[in-house]
Image (cartoon, helix red, strand yellow):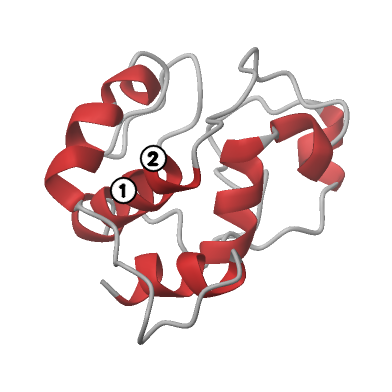
């Protein structure tokens, strides 16, 4: 759970002391994301999240991104994904994702733990 530990560290806890994300719980929480984002490489309303970690924002060739997302200089890692899930507009102002964010840090860490497993 390296990604989840990094998220917890970015949130202020040390990897050795913070609880790693719970991927099983993250899988359940991901249900709110999968309405728009697949993990199988197919785009839907939103771009696929397969291979999202390490990918530059707005770079899935087959997806029609907002101009803001295409211009974003974000590379998706634990910290940027955590921030985006918390407040998408704060990370990429003007993006078209109609989602207010995941408020709880634990929920975000769990979703990221699931993405670490499932989105490779």
Of residues 14 and 29, the one nearer the viewer is 14
Can residue 77 be seen? no
Q: Is residue 26 above or below residue 114?
A: above
Q: Looking at the image, which residue is at 65% across and 63% down?
A: 75
Position of 116 with respect to 52 (left or right) is left
Position of 15 with respect to 65 (left or right) is left
Q: Residues within 10 Å of mark 1 (few under 14, many from 20)?
A: many
Mark 2 lies on a secondary structure that is helix
Taking the view exactly as shown, the residue that stands out farthest to the left is: 24
Mark identifier at residue 107? 2
Residue 64 coordinates in the image, percent (x, y): 65, 24
Mark identifier at residue 110? 1
Of residues 101 and 72, the one nearer the viewer is 101
Position of 61 with respect to 17 (left or right) is right
Residue 37 coordinates in the image, percent (x, y): 39, 27
Q: Looking at the image, which residue is at 85% across and 30% down?
A: 67
Mark identifier at residue 36? none
- Marks 2/1: CA distance? 5 Å
Residue 111 coordinates in the image, percent (x, y): 34, 44
Residue 32 coordinates in the image, percent (x, y): 36, 18
Q: Are marks 2 and 1 in contact (CB under 8 Å)?
A: yes
Where, quadrant-wise, is the N terminus in this rendering? bottom left
Q: Is residue 3 above or below residue 117?
A: below
Of residues 93 and 69, the one nearer the viewer is 93
């Amino acid at each position: 759970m390296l990604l989840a530990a990094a998220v917890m560290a970015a949130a202020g806890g040390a990897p050795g002391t913070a609880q790693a994300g719970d991927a099983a719980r993250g899988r359940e929480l991901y249900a709110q994301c999968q309405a728009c984002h697949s993990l199988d490489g197919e785009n839907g309303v939103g771009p696929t999240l397969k291979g999202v970690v390490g990918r530059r924002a707005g770079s899935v060739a087959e997806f029609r991104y907002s101009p803001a997302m295409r211009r974003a200089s974000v590379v998706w890692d634990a910290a940027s994904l955590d921030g985006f899930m918390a407040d998408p507009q704060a990370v990429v102002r003007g993006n078209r994702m109609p989602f207010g964010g995941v408020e709880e840090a634990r929920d975000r860490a769990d979703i990221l733990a699931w993405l670490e497993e499932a989105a490779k």
